[in-house]
Image: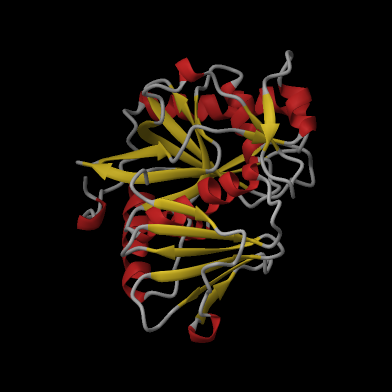
Amino acid sequence: MASWHLDLDISDKFPFAHANLTKLWTDRSGWISVSIDPAKQNVFLLHFRELASVWVEFANRYIRVRPVVSDFPSETVQHLIADQIVPRIIAHHGQLVLHAGAVRFDERAITILGESGRGKSTLVASLDANDWPLLGDDAIIVAVKGNIWTGTAVYRGLRLFSDSVNSLFPVSPGLSAVAHYTEKQRVSIPLEADHGNRSASLAAMFFLSPEPSDNRISLRQMTPAETCMGVIANSFSLDPTGRDRAGQKLAAASAFAATVPAFEVAYPRDYSILPDLHVVLRDQLTKLRNSGWDLARKDPPLPPSQRL
């Protein structure tokens, strides 16, 4: 992404040809919509409701952000680019990019996936605070080297609401605003801890399910088919309507799901439960480690596009 050019267009000096655009998709909340110019190849307009429009040109490697107001905060621009645009650009280039958090366990790593509001970032932060080093809490690039699947954070960041910060950190960490429209705060990560800590081979995936009615922690291994659909549902995409890229993602998700074990985990959303949840996760991962990280699944052929 370093070779891409970013322009902040606060004066509307570059007109967007809306009349020529065809809408591709809108997310379930209606917050993000993506359109394309049929006359141009790989030119997209992403519209973030009540925030900004973002023009992405792949041929010229150009990103233009047009905020809805002239005094648009710089941290909001950075958030949209880092957390929404960059993962989608990487995915459009053929990589599988999970909307997930990831932490290290021994020599490997796990990913935490779940819908917004399920506590993904809080769980990742609590694990990091208990010696499960953080990779990232939002976008993880998945690829395969040989027959080992790896996860690499787009960037090593952590974003939390104030109640999670107050509950998880005995000493308040350095905080900064994520964006003007959210109360989440960005937690500072020591620079010396970032070097060489963004990538690791993946041991398992944990999907966060809704809070249980019996207030107990439960863990269930998912089938490869369930896992594949969960991976697709929790991944970034710029153009999910494209048949070739959709097929490529399905092939990658299927191979990934058939190789890396996944578990559905349910637990009460209570900070006091987190230490017990850590034990459950550690016990399951210890079983995997003792079995040589192998659940006796037959590895399917790996899609050529995912080989490094």
Q: Nearer the viewer, residue 113 or 218?
A: 113
Quadrant where the C terminus sits is top left
Number of numbered labels in the structure image: 0
The image position of residue 217, as x and y in percent, is: 68, 36
The image position of residue 128, as x and y in percent, is: 57, 23
Residue at (73% x, 18% y) in the render: 172
Way the structure is coloured:
secondary structure
Left or right, residue 51 beside residue 151: right
The reply to whether residue 124 is in sight is yes
Residue at (35% x, 63% y) in the render: 58
Q: Nearer the viewer, residue 137 or 67?
A: 67
Residue at (77% x, 24% y) in the render: 167
Is 255 located above or below residue 174 in the figure? below
The image position of residue 123, as x and y in percent, is: 64, 33
The image position of residue 218, as x and y in percent, is: 64, 39
Q: Nearer the viewer, residue 73 or 156?
A: 73
Left or right, residue 77 beside residue 167: left
Residue at (66% x, 40% y) in the render: 178
